[in-house]
Amino acid sequence: MFKKILIANRGEIAVRVMKTCQRMGIKTVAVYSEGDRTALHPRFADEAVEIGPPPANESYLKVERILEAAKATGAEGVHPGYGFLSENSSFAQAAEAAGVKWIGPPTKAIDQMGDKLMAREVAKKSNVPIVPGSDILASPEEAKKMAKEIGYPVLLKASAGGGGKGMRVVETEDEIENAFERASSEAERSFGNPDMYMEKFVPHAKHIEVQVFSDTQGNHVWLGERECSIQRRHQKLIEESPSAAISEAQRQEMGEAAVALAKGCDYVNAGTVEFLYDADEKKFYFLEMNTRLQVEHPVTEMITGLDLVEWQLLVASGQALPLTQDQIQRQGVAIECRLYAEDPIDFLPATGRLRVFMPPEGEGIRLDTGFEQGDMVGSYYDPLLSKFIVHGKDRMDAIERLKRALDQFAIAGVTTNLAYHRAVLEIEDFQQGRHLTNFVETHSIEFDPTESEKKILAEVVGQLHQAREQKLVKSLASAQDGWSPQEVI
């Protein structure tokens, strides 16, 4: 087992990995930019190394600086977290070449699954159902021709894409040319690759993904599914497990399909196979595979009682998976909210100092965060403040527990989407599990974006009044003693 590893990331995922390392007796090294000098993750680590200016492309995306930090501190392995360099095969190769163990999948699997068209081919060969679609489209004219064959509406997607970038829904032929050019340009800016392909757009869809794990001995398991249909701009907001939309037979079928795909690309370590679930036809189709630990992995941890980061470290050190498929048990329902520093009306990022940051605690409640009260939320990185997860005996129990917990969550100083999450939980379509990927666009979600801050200010004012009253009583008592000067309130 590793004695020391470097976490090539920041924020909540860096802290989350460090917590498992602490429990396992593994020393940790944090890397941080100049803008993160006072952030939580360098404070939490055993050692911390500054690697560059605040912009990510001058710090967290600088492979050579990260590996220099690993060498200088004697780190034996590197955990990439998610985002940044987590699915960059060149980084994985460079780490291994430098004698630093890559805590993730093989570079071949990263490359295969990172290319959406190549991933579709692997899925096809593994007998995993895929959405009807095209190969690389050379031009808008070719896109028009393919759209006629597939049938509108269609979805233009970047071959090297992710996170909703380089993606456009097209309803008619008149929209193709503009959508193609815009999506291609966005893909070029985001991924350095303008290549586009097309898939049939499923209007009434759910987003359901399966957590898989593989070791170097050829063992593969699936740990349950997560539904991630509540999204804004193709990025997830609320995740839950299990999905209320599928039967146990479908769950088993999806799990086996995910394992088949993992076997098809000789996968090792943690991975997530994403499926599009047609709510009308009750069929699922392979979308993509994320070759890293997902943001929403705590949902799976809550229902299985397993530590997926621990599994990653065990597998990366050459050990076999701790459990076989028939030993994995899932209990209850877990729901996760991603709390962002953003204006939930237009989803634009927000900045400021967290004057108040007091999450509730209790049974069945978990918080993964990279912030503490008093920390500054800047503008250089993703505005994710924390992930708030609850576990209940069933779905309604989990929803009610999440409602109460969000009501008790005290945040002030930075605009957040906390009130937005609370409002979503009240909508019947969500409560009944009927929500689709277009939920945000098709539902009127009424909330007060300043609700949390108003509540905190009211509490603070109340505490000040109480303190003043207590001080007044003490002052009057002191005044009765001639030798005690009266206190000034």
Image (cartoon, rainbow, N blue to C red):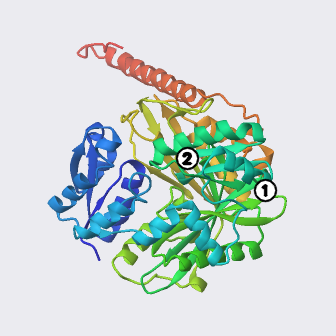
Instruction: Assess disc 2: are there few (<14), some (14-19) or many (≥20) residues with their C-alpha within 10 Å of its C-alpha.
Output: many
Q: Nearer the viewer, residue 169 or 2?
A: 169
Tags 1 and 2 in contact by the CB under 8 Å rule? no
Picture layout, residue 34 above or below residue 221:
above
Quadrant location of the C terminus in the rendered image: top left
Residue in the picture at 28% in, 39% down: 38
Q: Nearer the viewer, residue 295 or 371?
A: 295
**Disc 1, SS:** helix
Residue in the picture at 72% in, 37% down: 175
Q: Quadrant of residue 353?
A: top left
Q: Amino acid at mark 1?
A: Glu
The picture places residue 367, in percent across and down from the top left corner, at 49, 51
Of circles 1 and 2, the one toward us is: 1
Would you name the residue on which mark 2 appears?
Answer: 338
**Disc 2, SS:** strand
Picture layout, residue 381 above or below residue 266:
above
The picture places residue 443, in percent across and down from the top left corner, at 76, 38
The picture places residue 18, in percent across and down from the top left corner, at 34, 59
Would you name the residue on which mark 1 appears?
Answer: 149
The picture places residue 384, in percent across and down from the top left corner, at 48, 43
Quadrant location of the N terminus in the rendered image: bottom left
Q: Amino acid at mark 2?
A: Arg
Left or right: 127 as drawn, with respect to 4: right
The reply to whether residue 340 is in sight is yes
Picture layout, residue 275 above or below residue 258:
above
